[in-house]
Amino acid sequence: MTSKVQIFGKNMEVTDNIHDYVSDKAENLDRYLKRIDSTRVDLAYVKSARDAADRQVAQITVQGPRILLRTEERADDILAAFDTAYNKMKRQIERYKGKNERGRGDGRSAAEVAPDTFSNDEIEDEEMNIARSKKFTVYPMLVEEAYEQMQLLEHDNFFIFYNGDTNAINVLYRRRDGSYGLIEPEIA
């Protein structure tokens, strides 16, 4: 199955040549991981970059059930930036497969561990100005798996996940001294 590939350009024109090259290579990522549903490629020209060699930016985001991987690379040529990001994505997929195809150990699938629904209480405040809202699916994972996912996504500050051990939403965050903290909220 060939995954769906979306290509977006920012501050640059995505020519047919670039589009064909990028889509042909990006479609082949499902060779390395069969569970890929969609692949998003963002190509950008960043005029304000300090170094001219960092002005062309290629970002690849791969999504599937229980997986979200992202790479970003910069170069002086957009195709070189894409090729570097593509190779980095292949390495990330191999790393992900090596760490996550061991299984849960108890024989249960993630669907069996996850609760059926979550209730969202909406907060209404006329003075609050929400600049951006984001929804995402959470899957049960251990703290170690959350740390690995945090590294794979290159999230430096925090990562929100559903802790399979405690059956609660937790936040893993990086502290100023370089160590990590875990927030385990309790309902009063």
Image: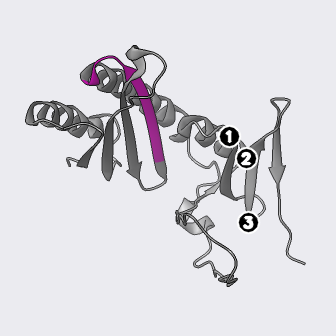
Question: Which stretch appears magenta?
Answer: 68-78
- Quadrant containing the C terminus is bottom right
Q: How many marks?
A: 3
Q: Quadrant of residue 30?
A: top left
Q: Which residue is mark 1?
A: 147
- Please tell me whether mark 3 or mark 1 is closer to you in this view: 1
Q: Which residue is mark 2?
A: 143
127 relative to 54 in the view: left or right: right
Cα distance between the residues tagged 2 and 1: 6 Å
Q: Secondary structure at mark 3?
A: loop
Going from the N terminus, do you reach mark 3 or mark 1 first?
1
| Residue 169 position within the rendered picture, expressed as x and y whole percent measured from the top left | 72, 63
| Residue 171 position within the rendered picture, expressed as x and y whole percent measured from the top left | 74, 54
The residue shown at (78%, 62%) is: 166
Scheme of colours in the image: one colour
Q: Is residue 45 part of the magenta span, yes or no?
A: no
Front residue of this view, candidates 32 and 80: 80
Which residue type does callout 1 highlight? Tyr
The residue shown at (58%, 78%) is: 116
On residue 186, which mark appears? none
Which residue type does callout 3 highlight? Asn
Cα distance between the residues tagged 3 and 2: 12 Å
Label 2–label 1 contact, CB within 8 A: yes
Q: From the viewer's perspective, is residue 4 above or below residue 128?
A: above
Q: Which residue is mark 3?
A: 167
Task: Classify 10 Å Cα crowding around label 3: few (below 14), some (14-19), many (20 and above).
Answer: few
Front residue of this view, candidates 106 and 55: 55
